Image (spheres, rainbow, N blue to C red):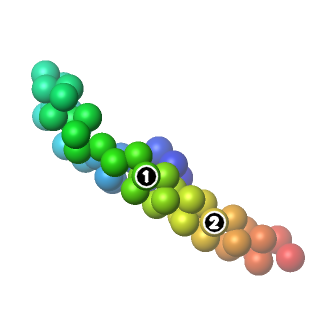
Amino acid sequence: MCMLTTKLIYQKRTAYYKQPLKFAKKQNIIRDTLILMILGGLFGALLAFIVI
């Protein structure tokens, strides 16, 4: 799930291979962490309800 989310967020990262500074400016670690935390929480809660 983490890899899929990262792939969706950075779909065009191959276009920035020769421009690493431009790609670094596009990244937002706080936003990415929050998105992954929310999706992980939802996925974990869903699994908890299915198991119980």
Name the element at disc 1: helix
Name the element at disc 2: helix
Q: Is residue 28 above or below residue 37?
A: above
Residue 50 found in image quarter: bottom right
Counting from the top left corner in percent of width and height, residue 19 is at 13, 26
From the image, state whether disc 2 or disc 1 is nearer to you: 1
Which mark is first along the chain, 1 or 2?
A: 1
Cα separation, mark 2 vs mark 1, equals 16 Å
Depth check: give the residue in front, 35 or 30.
30
Residue matched to label 1: 30
Residue matched to label 2: 41
Residue at image point 69% right, 65% down: 44
Q: Can residue 4 be seen by looking at this rendering?
A: no
Left or right, 3 with respect to 50, comes to left
Residue placed farthest to the top in the image? 18
Q: Can residue 37 be seen by looking at this rendering?
A: yes
Q: Residues within 10 Å of mark 2 (few under 14, many from 20)?
A: few
Say which amino acid is labelled 1.
Answer: Ile
Counting from the top left corner in percent of width and height, residue 47 is at 72, 68
Q: Is residue 33 above or below residue 23?
A: below
Depth check: give the residue in front, 32 or 2.
32
Q: Is residue 32 above or below residue 51?
A: above
Counting from the top left corner in percent of width and height, residue 36 is at 51, 56
Residue at image point 19% right, 28% down: 21
Residue at image point 23% right, 44% down: 26
Left or right, 38 with respect to 11, comes to right
In the picture, the quarter occupied by the C terminus is: bottom right
Say which amino acid is labelled 2.
Answer: Gly
